[in-house]
Image (spheres, helix red, strand yellow):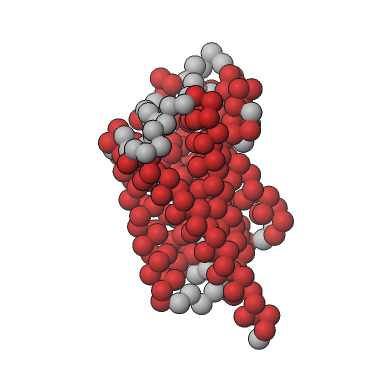
C-alpha cells in the first residue's frame, strides 16, 4: 500500500493510518517504492549477502519510525483498523529483523570489494552527512525541515529521518566491507530514493502549484536528493567494475 502513495495517492491517502498532504504522500510513496525494489532484489539473490545489508537498514528504519509513531500518537485515529495495523507491522518488522541480526551476529560477511582510499573517504563522508542530517531531522524536526520545499510537521520530519539514518547505516556497513551484491542493492535503493523524491515533487507541484522552484531551500533540497541518486549510480559503477575485474582474473 505504501508504494500506492506514489502511483495512486488519491486512492491510498484515505486508507493511510494518518492524514498526509499531497507532497508528503508522494515522498513517502517514492521511498516505499524503492523499498519494494530492494526486497525484490533480496528475493532474487536470497542469501546472506545482500540480506545482511537489507536487515540492517530495515531494522534502523522500523525502529525509528516506530519510536516516532509512539511519540506522535495524536496523529493516529485508533478507531480505524489502519492505525493498529501500522503499529503491528512496524513493531513486528523491527522485532524480526533485530532477531535475525542477533542470531547472525557472529556470521562473517561475504567477500567484499577492495575499496580504494578515495572510495573509502567518499563513503565515510557520505555516512557522516546522511547520519547528521537524519539525527537533525529526528531531534530538531522543526529547524531542519524548515529547509524543505513544502511545509513538514515534526512527525513527518521524524519519520523522514529514518530514511537518512537507514541510508547512513547501509553506507557505513559497506564502508567496512562491500560485497558486490550489497553495492548493487544499496545503489538501487539510493538511485530510486533520489529519483522518485524529485519526480514526486515535480508531479505533485504540477497539480497544486505550491513550490517556488527558484527558492534557495528548493534548490538545496533538489541538490541533496540529486546527490543521493548519483551516489547510487556510483555504487553501481563500483559493483560492475569489481565484477569485471573478478571475471578477468
Residue at (49, 24) in percent of width and height = 208
The quarter of the displayed image where residue 207 is located = top right
Where does residue 149 sit, x and y in percent of width and height? 39, 35
Q: Quick check: 26 left or right of 140? A: right
Q: Quadrant of the N terminus?
A: top right
Please tell me whether residue 230 is drawn above or below residue 25 in the rendered image: below
Give the image location of residue 113, x and y in percent: 54, 74
Outermost residue, front side: 214
Location of residue 208 with respect to 160 vertically, above or below: above
**Residue 123: x %, y % from top left:** 42, 64
Taking the spot 41% from the left edge, 37% from the top edge, the residue there is 213
Quarter of image, res 188: bottom right
Q: Is residue 154 left or right of residue 80?
A: left
- Residue 202 can be seen in this image: yes
In this view, which residue lies farthest toward the bottom? 249
Tell me where residue 26 sits by quadrant.
Answer: top right
Residue 56 in sight: no
Placement of 96 over or under 182, stated as above or below:
above
Task: List the single residue furthest toward the right.
Answer: 44
| Residue at image coords 64%, 74% | 243
Position of the C terminus, as image quadrant, is bottom right
Residue 130 image point, x, y percent: 39, 52
Amino acid at each position: 500500500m505504501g508504494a500506492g502513495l506514489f502511483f495512486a495517492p488519491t486512492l491510498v491517502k484515505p486508507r493511510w493510518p494518518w492524514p498526509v498532504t499531497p507532497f508528503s504522500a508522494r515522498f513517502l510513496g517514492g521511498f516505499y517504492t524503492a523499498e519494494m525494489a530492494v526486497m525484490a532484489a533480496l528475493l532474487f539473490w536470497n542469501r546472506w549477502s545482500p540480506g545482511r545489508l537489507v536487515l540492517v537498514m530495515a531494522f534502523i528504519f522500523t525502529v525509528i519510525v516506530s519510536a516516532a509513531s509512539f511519540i506522535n500518537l495524536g496523529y493516529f485515529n485508533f478507531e480505524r483498523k489502519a492505525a493498529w495495523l501500522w503499529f503491528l507491522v512496524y513493531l513486528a518488522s523491527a522485532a524480526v529483523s533485530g532477531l535475525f541480526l542477533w542470531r547472525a551476529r557472529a556470521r562473517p560477511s561475504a567477500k567484499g570489494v577492495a575499496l580504494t582510499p578515495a572510495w573509502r573517504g567518499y563513503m565515510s563522508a557520505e555516512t557522516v552527512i546522511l547520519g547528521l542530517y537524519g539525527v537533525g531531522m529526528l531531534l530538531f524536526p522543526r529547524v531542519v525541515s524548515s529547509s524543505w520545499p513544502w511545509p513538514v510537521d515534526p512527525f513527518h520530519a521524524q519519520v523522514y529521518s529514518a530514511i537518512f539514518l537507514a541510508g547512513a547505516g547501509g553506507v557505513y556497513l559497506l564502508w567496512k566491507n562491500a560485497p558486490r551484491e550489497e553495492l548493487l542493492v544499496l545503489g538501487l535503493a539510493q538511485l530510486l530514493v533520489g529519483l522518485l523524491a524529485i519526480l514526486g515533487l515535480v508531479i505533485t507541484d504540477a497539480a497544486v502549484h505550491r513550490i517556488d522552484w527558484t527558492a534557495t531551500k528548493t534548490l538545496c533540497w533538489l541538490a541533496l536528493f540529486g546527490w543521493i541518486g548519483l551516489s547510487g549510480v556510483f555504487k553501481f559503477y563500483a559493483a560492475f567494475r569489481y565484477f569485471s575485474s573478478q571475471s578477468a582474473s
